[in-house]
Amino acid sequence: KVGWYNAVVQPAFHLPYTDDTLAFVVLSTPSMFEKALKPFVNKERLKIIRDPVDQCVSYHLSRLKEKFPDQTVDIMFDYELLPNRKPKFLAQTAAHVSGAAYYYQRKDVKLDPWGKKKIFGVCIHPRYGGWFAIRGLLLFPDIQVPFLEQCAPVDCVSTEEQRIELLEQFNFHWQDTRYRDIIEVKEKYSEEQKAYFATPPAERLKLLGLTQ
């Protein structure tokens, strides 16, 4: 419910819907690259003018919207910004309150070893670890779900030592992707997908056989 999200974020990030409004958090799993992105690029090759992943997600969620012709469906994408350059919604918080993935933050560590350093939090999925992404929100303004029960996300990084290790790796060694494997995962990115996301955004089009 939108109210679960609005209750834990600052007013500047409140979503403009009633508390009982139904919302879905959309995740992409590791197989998205092979099952969705590559077929999309092959089909829409001439229409790709910005980030292929963003366009692929937009394409699929827009098609999903068409499945509900009698409903109002609002879509917010993770890459969208407000005029003040802040994100339209806080993706990791939304994932946490929806029960999709646990958002580990500095406040989840009792004996904080970082002093005055800025420490960013990170979501971990019980099945995919850090090998997934939060892509968007689907909101159904006309559907109110007052009796929907909130499910807590799975706390899969449960020890103090593991949480410190996770936040250390994510904040200071994120390029080597070790934080993604903080737990044993069922599926992870293919080598091709790892190479794609490790490449600077400006050079990714070449990897997909696209020219600027």
Image (tube, rainbow, N blue to C red):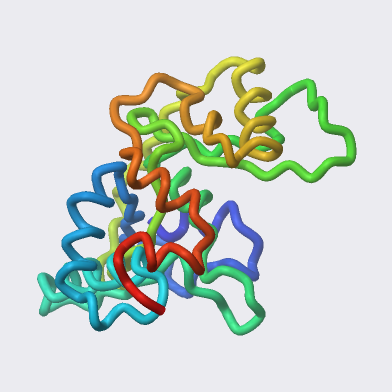
Q: Is residue 23 above or below residue 105?
A: below
Q: Residue at x 36, y 33 (%)?
A: 128
**Closer to the camera in the image, 89 or 38:** 38
In the image, residue 28 sits, relative to residue 62, either above or below, namely above
Q: How many numbered circles does the render carry? A: 0
Quadrant of the rendering where the N terminus is positioned: bottom left
Q: Residue 22 is drawn in which quadrant?
A: bottom left
To which quarter of the image does residue 25 belong? Answer: bottom left
Residue visible at 50% across and 40% down in the picture: 123
Q: Give residue 101's position: percent from left, percent from top.
A: 42, 39
**x, y (%) of residue 9?**
60, 57
Please state the horizontal and vertical placement of residue 69, each as a whole percent of the image.
Answer: 11, 78
- x and y percentages locating residue 142 in the rendered image: 26, 73
Q: Is residue 52 left or right of residue 124?
A: left
Q: Which residue shows up at 40% across the image and 34% down it?
A: 125
Which quadrant would the C terminus be assigned to in this image?
bottom left
Choose between 79 and 14: the one closer to the eye: 79
Q: Is residue 116 left or right of residue 175?
A: right
